[in-house]
Amino acid sequence: MQNDKSKFKNKFKQRLYSFTLRLVEFIDKLPSDNISQRIGDQLLRSGTSILGNYIEGQAASSKKDFTNFFNYSLKSANESKLWVCLLRDSKRVSSKEEVEWFLKELDEIANIFASSILTLKGKK
């Protein structure tokens, strides 16, 4: 059982890292107009924060601290969905497939964090 948990944690960390790299490439391809750049900056902050807070949580000093970092990651995933939707709806992104992939991936990541938080709080 513990081995399965360890495998899941490693795969999830790799998934978050791959997501973050793909996000950086996506943002780098945005148009260079002022609006796209500002929304891209916000997306970069929130999107990279997901992984950053997850990594910080691994070194947490208490269960409460650990849970808080997961909460920050969850909030960052939800915020990232907003920025991706704004880029899509303001027609600043040409690849609908890529936008849909990001939204699906962010939903799945958010669901994993939400489920983990419920488990940590003993509500699941």
Image (cartoon, rainbow, N blue to C red):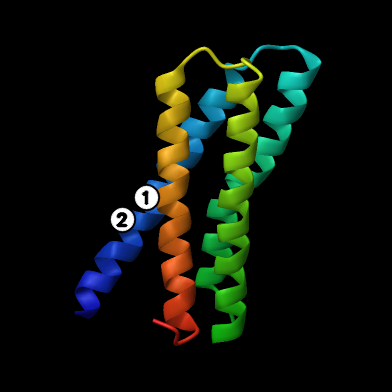
Residue 96, by quadrant, is top left
Q: CA distance from mark 1 to mark 2?
A: 5 Å
Side of 10 relative to 87 (left or right): left
Q: Secondary structure at mark 2?
A: helix
Q: Quadrant of the C terminus?
A: bottom left
- Identify which amino acid the numbered label 1 is placed on: Gln
Q: Are marks 1 and 2 in contact (CB under 8 Å)?
A: yes
Q: Hey, which residue is sitting farthest right in the picture? A: 34
Residue extending farthest front: 89
The correct choice, above or below, for 91 with respect to 1 in the image is above
Q: Secondary structure at mark 1?
A: helix
On screen, 110 above or below 96?
below
Q: Which residue is mark 1?
A: 14
| Residue 11, numbered label | 2
What is the x, y in percent for residue 78? 58, 50
Residue 119 to residue 32: above or below: below
| Amino acid, disc 2 | Lys
Quadrant of residue 18 within the rendered picture: top left
